[in-house]
Amino acid sequence: MIRLASVLVAASLTSACALLPSPIRVPAPVPVSAPAPAAPADPGGPRWIEPASPAPRAAVPIAPPRDAPPSDVVEARLLAAHNDERRRVGAPPLLWSADLEVEARGWARELIATGRFAHDPRPHGHGENLWTGWGDRTWTPEEMVEDWIEERKDYRPGVFPNVSRTGNWTAVGHYTQLIWAGTTHVGCAIEARGDQQLLACRYAPPGNVDGRRP
């Protein structure tokens, strides 16, 4: 999720990640006669997680996205998962954007390849939600989006950024972007490497704009 000031976008990170332990240090040599200590287990997942910034970004003028039907079943399921919740709250359904999907996939691939987990710092002018999970299981598109939807337990209707029962908009920023009534298009991409899956979604026009209601 990303936050915009009046004409700005707000950013948020995944609900499925935790800070990782410090980098593993190589133990000092031990005598041949002594058994070598077991190497610490690899925790998996990204090696660097950047917390979401609560500060607003400046808005960037962008051209309206072009809509297109989802190109495969996974994209269709991601779109449906968004629109099921939007329907529940009375927000108009989103349209799929191939342009936003390409943009989201490029960033998802960069994160997977570098072991990072952070919002795209470039001035792309769109909203962004990120999710990641790792371990000996596979998540469905619906489960990934549901992690964002679960933030509604802390959501309270109001003028952004005063939309969270916790007093911190980042606790609900994925959810508010997902249901933002002024957002018309979404494009998402899932990338995987090893035991990690990563979902990136881009939204246009962006939500989480200061002084406006979701």
Image (tube, rainbow, N blue to C red):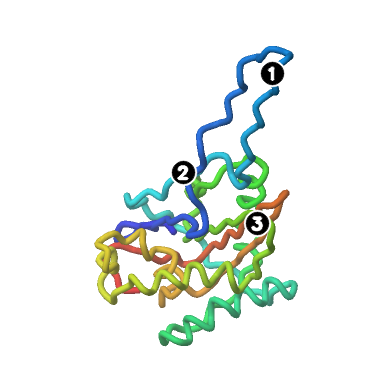
Which residue carries the number 2 mark? 50
The quarter of the rendered structure image containing the N terminus is: bottom left
Q: Dots 2 and 3: beta carbons under 8 Å? A: no
Q: Dot 3 lies on which element?
A: strand
Three-letter amino acid code at the position of disc 1: Ala
Frontmost residue, 125 versus 42? 42
Three-letter amino acid code at the position of disc 3: Gln
Looking at the picture, how far across and down is residue 173, in whole percent? 39, 63
Three-letter amino acid code at the position of disc 2: Glu
Which residue carries the number 3 mark? 197
Label 3 crowd (10 A; few <14 / some 14-19 / many >=20): many
- Disc 2/disc 3 C-alpha distance (Å): 17 Å
Residue for point 36% across, 74% down: 153
Label 1 crowd (10 A; few <14 / some 14-19 / many >=20): few
Which residue carries the number 1 mark? 34
Q: Dot 2 lies on which element?
A: loop
Q: Dot 1 lies on which element?
A: loop
